[in-house]
């Protein structure tokens, strides 16, 4: 069950993650008048001995355009922190940064990675965002934390709620994801579109519904404190 939220922030480790994790929920609440944001912790670094600063700058420009276009397609704004993976702050420092941001933004709903991930930056984001929300709850701020389904974060991922989608909403979500080159197969051969379209059908069946659904998991350790 989901509540009535006014400030919704989806925090992903890399560009595309925030939209995968929170996209349908962001679309739902943006349409209700909430302010919604996609937040990206890291950006990619071009690799290889011949990469020049100009090539990295051009890559960064394209990536920021993709972030902005995807956010706009979801009815959101975006916040790119632009860390390189190797230059991320320690977890305690980053937890404080996230807590300060969420407090300043008066966030009442946050979406991020689930714990059971195969990617170290995903786990870093899960750990720091979860702890930041825990600290803010201890201050008395009523923030709901959801973990969104991501194909790299499925170990122990057990849905506790499903957000149903019409064909129109599914198309809007996938259309937002298609703003990224990586989603369209231009970076690797992961069949992103086929996976997330298929999972939307499977999750709808699990929910006992017809059509499409996105799975979310409540932050159980926080909710049971």
Image (tube, helix red, strand yellow):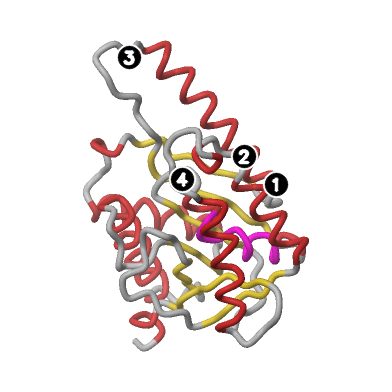
Mark sitting on residue 13: none
Q: Position of residue 191 (x, y in %)?
A: 49, 49
Q: Is residue 143 left or right of residue 35?
A: left
Camera-near label (4 vs 2) is: 2
Q: Quadrant where the N terminus lies? A: bottom right
The alpha-carbon separation of the residues under discs 4 and 3 comes to 23 Å
Mark 3 lies on a secondary structure that is loop
Mark sitting on residue 179: 2
- First reached walking from the N terminus: tag 1 or tag 4: 4
Q: Is residue 62 left or right of residue 49?
A: right
Q: Are marks 4 and 3 in contact (CB under 8 Å)?
A: no
Q: Residue at x 50, y 33 (%)?
A: 186
- First reached walking from the N terminus: tag 4 or tag 2: 4
Q: Are marks 4 and 2 in contact (CB under 8 Å)?
A: no
Q: Are marks 1 and 2 in contact (CB under 8 Å)?
A: yes
Q: Position of residue 32 (x, y in %)?
A: 76, 66
Q: Quadrant of residue 136?
A: bottom left
Q: Is residue 1 left or right of residue 157?
A: right
Q: Quadrant where the C terminus lies? A: bottom left
- First reached walking from the N terminus: tag 4 or tag 3: 4
**On the image, numbered disc 4 is attached to which residue?**
40
Which residues make up the magenta segment? 20-29
């Amino acid at each position: 069950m989901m509540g009535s939220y006014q400030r919704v922030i989806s925090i992903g480790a890399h560009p595309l993650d925030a939209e995968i994790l929170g996209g349908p929920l962001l679309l739902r609440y943006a349409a209700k008048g909430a302010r919604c944001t996609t937040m990206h912790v890291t950006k990619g670094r071009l690799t290889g001995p011949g990469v020049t600063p100009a090539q990295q700058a051009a890559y960064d420009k394209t990536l920021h355009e993709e972030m902005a276009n995807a956010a706009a397609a979801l009815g959101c704004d975006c916040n790119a922190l632009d860390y390189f993976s190797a230059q991320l702050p320690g977890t305690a420092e980053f937890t404080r940064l996230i807590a300060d941001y969420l407090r300043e933004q008066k966030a009442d709903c946050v979406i991020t990675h689930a714990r059971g991930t195969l990617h170290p930056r995903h786990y870093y984001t899960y750990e720091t965002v979860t702890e930041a929300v825990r600290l803010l709850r201890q201050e008395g701020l009523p923030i709901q934390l959801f973990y969104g389904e991501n194909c790299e974060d499925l170990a122990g991922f057990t849905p506790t709620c499903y957000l149903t989608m019409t064909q129109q909403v599914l198309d809007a979500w996938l259309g937002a994801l298609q703003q990224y080159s990586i989603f369209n197969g231009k970076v690797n051969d992961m069949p992103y579109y086929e996976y997330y379209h298929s999972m939307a059908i499977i999750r709808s069946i699990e929910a006992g519904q017809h059509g499409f659904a996105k799975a979310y998991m409540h932050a159980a350790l926080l909710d049971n404190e």
